[in-house]
Amino acid sequence: MVHHVLTPNQSLVKASSNKNKLSEHISRASRNIKMADFKEPRRMIRAFDAFPKVPPSQQVHSVRGGYTSLMMYLFMIFLIWIEIGGYIDGEVHNLFTVDDVIRHDLRINVDLIVAMPCNFLNTNVRDATDDRFLASELLNFQGTTAYIPTWFFESKKKVVTPEMESVLRNSMNAEFQAQGTRDNEELPACHIYGYIPVNRVKGDFHITAKGYGYRDRSFVPIEQLNFTHYINEFSFGDFYPYMDNQLDMTYKITDESHHSFNYHMTVVPTTYKKLGVEIDTNQYSLTNFETSGMYIPGIYFRYDFDPIKMIIEEKRIPFWQFVIRLITIIGGLVVVVKWTFKGFEKLIYILFGKEFAKRGDEKKEGGLLVRHEEEFVTI
């Protein structure tokens, strides 16, 4: 047996090599311990995963699932479109509240035709304070022919609160330019139009014949009385000619000379608000009746004021609420469709068997990218 004797230099080199190997083993062991310590908490956290991942190679695509997904996407787009439209248009809120605005007076806007000559008629206002006002000094009287336009008969009056869009679209303010004019008073009918400033208290505006109810130099024979009339405009407050009111485009016909028409109105201040635009109007409830031979012949508009006001306001929800609603709709739709589809698939499996249920299924093949995804999932 031959024994090799190492020189001092060789012994030193070997000792150094062994020392390096030992250090490498210690370092590798330390890294393994650290990786184990690092992976252990990740495994514990992964146990709480509420969103488990299915490897693409294990996913099965079916024709039924494709149709279901397509219909779900279309329905989702439809719901999102509705929500966007609702957000843009806003929601209309109706509110009744105490009228805290002190108002002393307002206008009555009048535009009507009476089937009598203008020189036969008197127009006056009388209120609860016993204040009397000769409306004929401000109203315009224009002689015309007595006929009722055909569209008065063709259109049926609908009593509704005007909608927000209709008010904003028709809120063009106007004024009666002329005041106190009189033309062609001898013609068989009289067109009375203009505005009357009145106290904001209970009162009435009435149209009577001369010599009836008030002392007058002239007297109209009773057989010539005819208070058939049609109303183009009757409103309170600012004059908006394109807004529809209760009495607008209405008419009353009579063949009796000693006949009276009575309109009772309760006025409610109404404010419309939309995106910084505010319009103050007045709407009114209406009851009416006719009498013959009981009262002084004429047309009587009796009005009173409610101590409340109506606010019609269009509001939009905050943008963050809109986003949350969209997310809720999308998430809820996906969950409902998912569970409905699973129940439907289970029903097909029970009724028709496994082979029929698997028709049209296609399993996704794995590949290089899929393998990497699986490796990533199983970390």
Image: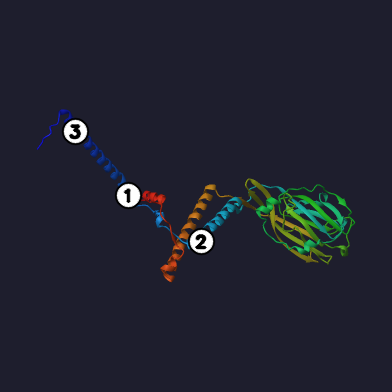
Residue 73: x and y in percent read 52, 57
The label on residue 318 is none
Residue sitting at 17 percent across and 30 percent down? 10
**Of helix, strand and loop, which one carries label 2?**
helix
**Residue at mark 2 to residue at mark 3: CA–CA distance:** 73 Å
Badge 2: how crowded within 10 Å, few (<14), some, or many (20+)?
few
Instruction: Locate residue 184 relative to residue 305 in the image: left or right.
Output: right
The disc labelled 2 sits on which kind of residue?
Tyr
Q: Do the residues labelled 3 and 1 touch (CB within 8 Å)?
A: no
The answer to which of marks 3 and 1 sits earlier in the sequence is 3
Q: SS for tag 1?
A: helix
Q: Residue at x 59, y 53 (%)?
A: 85
Mark carried by residue 14: 3
Q: What element carries label 3?
A: helix
Earlier in the chain: of badge 2 and badge 3, it is 3
Question: Where is mark 1, residue-wise?
Answer: 43
Q: What residue type is labelled 3?
A: Lys
The circle drawn on residue 67 is 2
| Residue type at the position of mark 1 | Arg
Q: Answer yes or no: is residue 27 visible.
A: yes
Mark 3 or 1: in front is: 3
Report the front residue among 74 and 99.
74
Locate residue 124: give its quadrant.
bottom right
Residue 294's spot in the image, x, y percent? 79, 66
Looking at the picture, tell me which residue is in the foreground, 67 or 303: 67
Instruction: Decide which of 222, 367 is in the foreground and name it.
Output: 367
Instruction: State if disc 1 and disc 2 touch (CB < 8 Å).
Output: no
